[in-house]
Amino acid sequence: MLNWREADFSAYTSTIAYPSKEEEERQKEAMHTAEGLVADLTAKLGHAPSCCVVTFGCQMNARDSEKIQGVLECVGFTATESEEADLVIYNTCTVRDNANQRVYGRLGHLKSMKQKNPEKRIALCGCMIQEPDVIEKLKTSYRFVDLLFGTHNIYKFPELLCKLLTKNTEDRMLIDVWKSTDAIVEDLPVVRKYPFKSGVNIMFGCDNFCTYCIVPYVRGRERSRSSREILQEVEKLAADGVVEVMLLGQNVNSYGNGLPGELTFPELLQEVEKVDGIKRIRFMTSHPKDLSDELIAVMRDSKKICRHLHLPVQSGSTEVLRKMNRRYTREQYLELVAKLRREIPDLSLTTDIIVGFPGETKEDLQQTIDLVNEVKYDNAYTFIYSPRTGTPAASYPKTMTEEEIKEGFDELLKAVQKNAQEAVLRLEGRTEEVLVEEINTHDPGLMTGRLSNNVLVHFPGDESMIGKFYTVKLTENHGFYYIGEKV
Ligand code: 5AD
Ligand code: SF4
């Protein structure tokens, strides 16, 4: 298997980073060309070609998919959720191996669809494509895929699309994967999934190198966007009807590092708060080691920052945290939580936890379960450790058996669910503000929305309420969500 650090991408990569304004112009030109190519294809097919962008993984990928979708719709594609579409793009995730396996599984179905539709094109992008052994596997066993591109050159998508549209099915797979880039290209078109809320990238990449994590290898070094560009984007979104923004970065607390004179993350939040029209501000993800008192104070005093913090702990054992290179101890994490609870009593806390990390013992896992019961998280995402090629932990020896891991995982899940239900129960009977997001998927007479602390609420209403705020009494507790009534 190829190793990350030694991997030679030169066969399919270039690392030239264009100055971003110049690159923006280049891509805009490519969009004109793509528009012409789509018009030709429309004439050939007798209808506008359809496209389906499927997102795997995190909020970052969701935002990237909105950019891809933006370009496609701008040049004349019709969006659909069906993978029968003329162009299917999988925006992949590789944080755990099961994400990769899902992609390989679904590609099998695409192959048979492509045999029926010779004009069909298939592209893969995102984190998985940054792995050299994945590229090799796709080249040998999935030759029907037309285009591969990675995370660093997504802004080149208009240009790549032109190549894809002029490629014959039988031509060799197009591969454009970069090892890294410093370029941040602003201003490509975006189609938002929701008209009233939007993610906003504030930084890309990660420098933390937690020993289990592939993100620093597939997303590259940490780079922050300038606050001027970010605020301009937020203002534009607000003018366009967006009321909720989610500031996105792998570690938002280190925003601005490496940009001399740039705002800190708490200062950036204060500036976003000043934007008229924005009513709710969320952000993701906070590394506990960098969460400052300044941030806690800004959250406490803010009228717009939501009462929810995602604070991944990963493990409740100091020894495991050390092996994970998390750079905080169990005690430091608990102290931080105590401070947050003191300053912002109604804050909802969620977390990520990994079970079965190499070196973890049953006693370590018990410490994690105890920590969950102590912190009383509103929710936790629990994962079984998945070795990722090239990360340091992939070569660490395993300690627990599969059986022990499974048992420990189930026990942890029970603790998580018990605490989550108790957290939701505490809201019963309260009257809260809800931002309506969509029609309930099971009952069209109900609308689904979220509280500031992220809890879901369903209450009677109609489509015209989407994107608006309502005061709702939380009447029926259903374990993880509420049925409410408008007051
Ligand atoms: N195995 C299992 N879980 C992982 N995560 C990241 N890398 C791995 C891995 N190799 C989890 C962490 C992170 C979340 C996004 O995914 O908990 O916070
Ligand atoms: Fe991965 Fe750690 Fe960076 Fe999060 S902070 S993306 S877990 S390396």
Image (cartoon, rainbow, N blue to C red):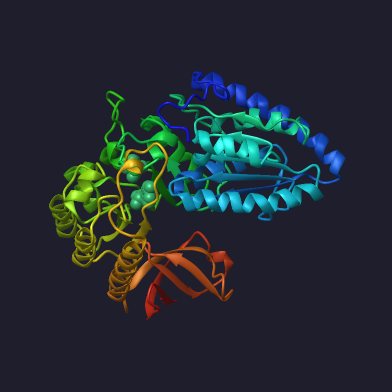
Left or right position of 153 against 199:
right
Q: Nearer the viewer, residue 401 or 319?
A: 401
Residue 483: x and y in percent read: 43, 77
State the residue at coordinates (19%, 43%).
294
Residue 481 versus residue 130 in the image, above or below: below
Residue 67: x and y in percent read: 56, 40
Residue 461: x and y in percent read: 53, 73
Left or right position of 1 against 156:
left
Q: Nearer the viewer, residue 184 or 433?
A: 184
* Residue 325 seen: yes
Residue 6: x and y in percent read: 42, 26
Which corner quadrant of the image does residue 170 belong to? top right
Residue 234 versus residue 340 in the image, above or below: above
Which corner quadrant of the image does residue 487 belong to? bottom left
| Tally of numbered tags | 0
Which corner quadrant of the image does residue 380 belong to? bottom left
Residue 132 versus residue 431 in the image, above or below: above
* Residue 281 seen: no
Residue 324 versus residue 376 in the image, above or below: above
